[in-house]
Amino acid sequence: MTDTISDAVAVGRRVLSIEAQALSQMADGLGEAFARAVQVMHDAKGRIVCTGMGKSGHVARKIAATLASTGSQAMFVHPAEASHGDLGMIGPDDVVLALSKSGEARELADTLTYCKRFSIPLIAVTAVATSQLGKAGDVLLLLPDAPEATAEVNAPTTSTTLQIALGDALAVALLESRGFTASDFRIFHPGGKLGAVLRTVADLMHGAEELPLVAESAPMGEALLVMSQKRFGAVGVIDAAGDLVGLITDGDLRRHMDGLMGHAAGEVMTRGPLVIASGALAAEALKVMNERRITVLFVVEAGKPVGVLHVHDLLRAGVI
């Protein structure tokens, strides 16, 4: 069993090494054609239609999904289905991104002819420049002539890794050219752990009616009552203008235990509490809480409290 494990690890390292070398080779070879491909996609008034057959088709579907989630209108069209009516899904304002290692997938022929007939820009991704696909492309993105990672069976491995990586490179270059932000990404990806981390403080905070607040002049008896009723383990202190000027937590109570009930909230509070803006990402709020070892953050706008966020809110939302 030990030999089997050792052999498996050796194979794994060999495969990753072969694919890493091919990726490095492709990165070194990127140039004007890549920039033109990004520009063509950027300027498209319609959608980016990704297509391919077999494993290249699976990659094309993944690229379409990545583009769509990063702000580009994109879709996958199966080349065989395209020949039976789905060519009608490709409009005159669209761009077609076609993938085939050999460039000779027969199922792509009708799509290539359609693009030429209706002057639809075609970005060709292939390892053979002289192939049917390579010659048809308005922009040719040539994959390196790198060996597949399989020793005897010529299964798509290195070639599909290159296609996926090139698709990622196109998507990232495109989103950066459009100034696509994390907030934009959140619109298209509200689900899962990633969606939770990209939610804003405003999405999770407790609003005005739930705010635990007292005036600086309020007696500590009132502050303790508000702290108990609101159940955040803290109470904010505001001045006459309604600005948040302090925070009372369990630690402040312990420090002023002697004669506590004879003090006003302003005498017990810690001045200049940590606050956060409503537009900040939930991940940023979590970082502040972790770094400062606190469980409550008041949300302020122009100095005035508009919400409060507890670490349990982040936990329930899946941010933690």
Image (spheres, rainbow, N blue to C red):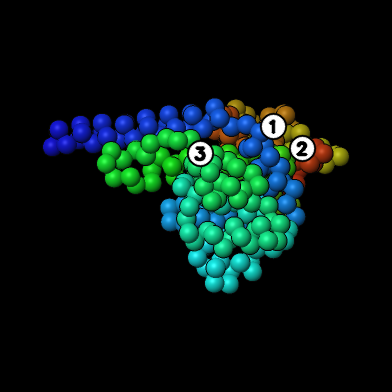
The residue tagged 2 is 244
In whole angstroms, how far apart are the C-alphas of marks 2 and 1? 8 Å
Q: Nearer the viewer, residue 168 or 242?
A: 168
What residue is drawn where x is 75% and y is 55%? 45
Mark 3 and mark 1 lie on one chain; the one further toward the N terminus is: 3
The spot of residue 282 in percent (x, y) is 62, 43
Give the quadrant of residue 234: top right
In this rendering, is residue 114 above or below 5? Answer: below
Closer to us: mark 3 or mark 2? Answer: 3
Residue 271 spot, x, y in % from top left: 72, 29
Q: How many marks?
A: 3
Q: Which residue is mark 3?
A: 143
**Up-down: is 109 above or below 66?**
below
> The residue tagged with tag 2: helix, strand or loop?
strand
Which secondary structure, mark 1? loop
Contact (Cβ within 8 Å) of mark 3 with mark 2: no
Q: Which mark is residue 273?
A: 1
Q: Are marks 2 and 1 in contact (CB under 8 Å)?
A: yes
Check disc 3 and report its element: helix, strand or loop.
Answer: loop
Report the front residue among 305 and 266: 305
